[in-house]
Amino acid sequence: MTIQNKALKTDVDRDLLRAGIRQGNIPTLLAVLYQMSGDARWLRPPYTPGRARGLDDNDDGGLPPEIQDEIRDAAQQAIFAWLDGAQLAIPAPDHQTLANMLSVSMHEPVPDSYGEVIASDLGLSEHRLSPQVTWPAGTRALVIGAGVSGICAGVNLQQMGVDFEIIEKNEDFGGTWWENRYPGAGVDTPNHIYSFSFAPNDWSRYFALQGELLTYFQSVADRFDLRQATRFETRVDEARWNDETRKWQVTMTGPDGTRTETCDILMSAVGVLNTPQIPDIPGAETFAGVATHTAQWPEDLDVTGKRVALVGNGASGMQVAPAIIDKVEKLTVFARSKQWAAPFPQFQKKVPDPVRYLLMTVPLYQQWYRIRQFWTFNDRIHESLQKDPTWPEPDKALNATNDRHRQIFTAYVKAELGDRQDLLQEMLPDFPPYGKRILLDNGWYRTLTKPNAELVPARLSRIEGSTLIAADGSTSEADVLVYATGFKAAEMQSSYEIIGQGGQHLKDAWETDNPSAYIGSMVPGFPNFFTILGPNVGLGHGGSMIKAIELQTSFILSIISRMFERNAQTVAVTAQAHESYNARIDEAHNKMVWTHQGTENWYRNSRGRVVAISPWRNDYFWSLTRDADPGAFTFET
């Protein structure tokens, strides 16, 4: 499901659209202009954009003003002609041309394999190759979780006419964005790609905050009428496979008590960042003030004039600190490790109203804008994350490109610290860039230079009332204690018991924190059970989780299609396919930055194995999830 190349062409405010074109993104307009006009000169000098710096959108393309004006004038003429009924001159460029268009737009090489992916994003071809099989009458599916993954599954199942129900422990849709309401909470991926391909949105910011994100996901659920198929405030206690009936028995507890329901297909959409990780700190129970995890932030918590201690400096910590620094009396940050953060030129930047109108009025513009962002935030850096065994300083970087990034980021940190270079030693990481998920700087470095901020480069080791004692022996006083300590990412599916064939518990099969699955979706011994955003599906090198969720949902439906195509009642992945795939996963990760000897991150489990994220480039994952290989499964009628 993708945006289509057509719009409601009546009642268009041409003055507002004209203003949007004058402010629009030049590299994106060039792609639109080429398809609308068919004139290949727009893909050649002097019109070809320069390369963007960092994560910037490169709106002017680095081109002289007179060339920009020529492009905008031609784009306006082409778009207005399209509004008046003109057809696209090149409605379906071939795959090589599409890859070249993106390469020109980005001013850097793009693999030819991306052409097919772009065609799918433009709605020119389908991602899923498996046949559209009608599910047998009476087949029932249960989806556990009503966050992003659950909504995606629900929309797909509804459009297939399947009998399904979503079970959600919270009061409403939203998952992560319903639970994480701490100050400054927002997305670190551009929300024009952090959105469903089948549900474009009129975003007010380039990087939305929690409230707008939650509103979006709830509106999508309502747009597709998922509320009537969802049971809220209901927690799943256990899912047990019945070998005799060959169905799942799901026990759940809600407002009306405990009940057990059966289903043929069970999809677990509880996500990875679901169970808060709260450190076991001696004396924590004696803390005299308010203590909370960022994912459990009380609605009535006011930190104004308070002494606040923040434990952790990952993504949530970096968002909380700048959001509250000007309100608190003092902010003490306990940071036992260091983080790389990239320049973030679009932090809190609003999308100009005319550009919003352009994005929503001309779907082809929005599609190409999204395609460029997918490349920038997804795969642009993938090659630089590979270890070069000949690199002379492996403790600092992986390869020449990675070392260049290190130099750029180091210069940026120094500049942000200004006259507080005394903080540099405590803030500059001693591991290669991207060894942890790269963070986007929303004022973090400048926050810690403020007079009411204190950085404690050590873990919080003990609490005695309102006194906090760090591992280095220093002490601090606090009225509010905030744990920005992330989630138990390696302990997936731990929020309820899952019992498969022969009474096998999934947590035992996964040894608690060592999860693995075939293409993140199926585990041997657990028939008709599918995990969405399961092991090794998330994107460590950046980009939109939603893209991965859509692709994986498509793959799961292709597995089920192959099952019903054979008139089978059950499908299970073979141990051989599972083991072979995960051996490839481990081999790929061992060549990448996340297994670097000097790196610790939440992607890895207690054994050092990467379990949370994918090593694959996105075009490869796209190809992996197009269809289910029947040879990887056993089917029973």
Image: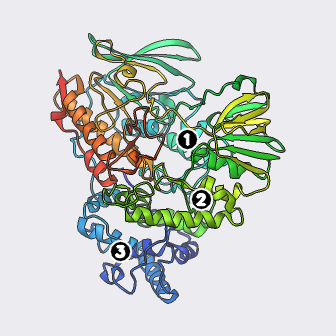
SS label for mark 1: helix
1 or 2: mark nearer the eye: 2
Q: Determine whether, in the image, residue 462 is placed left or right of residue 502.
A: right
The residue wearing badge 1 is: 218
Numbered label attached to residue 394: none
Q: Is residue 98 above or below residue 324?
A: below
- Asked whether 130 or 299 is in front, the reply is 299
Numbered label attached to residue 104: 3
Numbered label attached to residue 205: 2
Amino acid type at mark 1: Gln
Q: Is residue 191 above or below residue 177?
A: below
Pick whichever of labels 2 and 3 is earlier in the sequence.
3
Amino acid type at mark 2: Arg
Residue drawn at x 53%, y 30% as measured from the top left? 275
How far across and how far down the image is residue 452, in percent? Answer: 79, 51
Q: Quadrant of the C terminus?
A: top left
Residue drawn at x 21%, y 36% as measured from the top left? 580
Q: Compute the Cα span from label 1 to label 2.
A: 18 Å
Pick whichever of labels 1 and 2 is earlier in the sequence.
2
Q: Determine whether, in the image, residue 329 is placed left or right of residue 503.
A: right
CB atoms of marks 1 and 2 within 8 Å: no
How far across and how far down the image is residue 394, in percent? Answer: 39, 56
Amino acid type at mark 3: Val
In the picture, residue 121 is in which quadrant? bottom left
Colour convention: rainbow
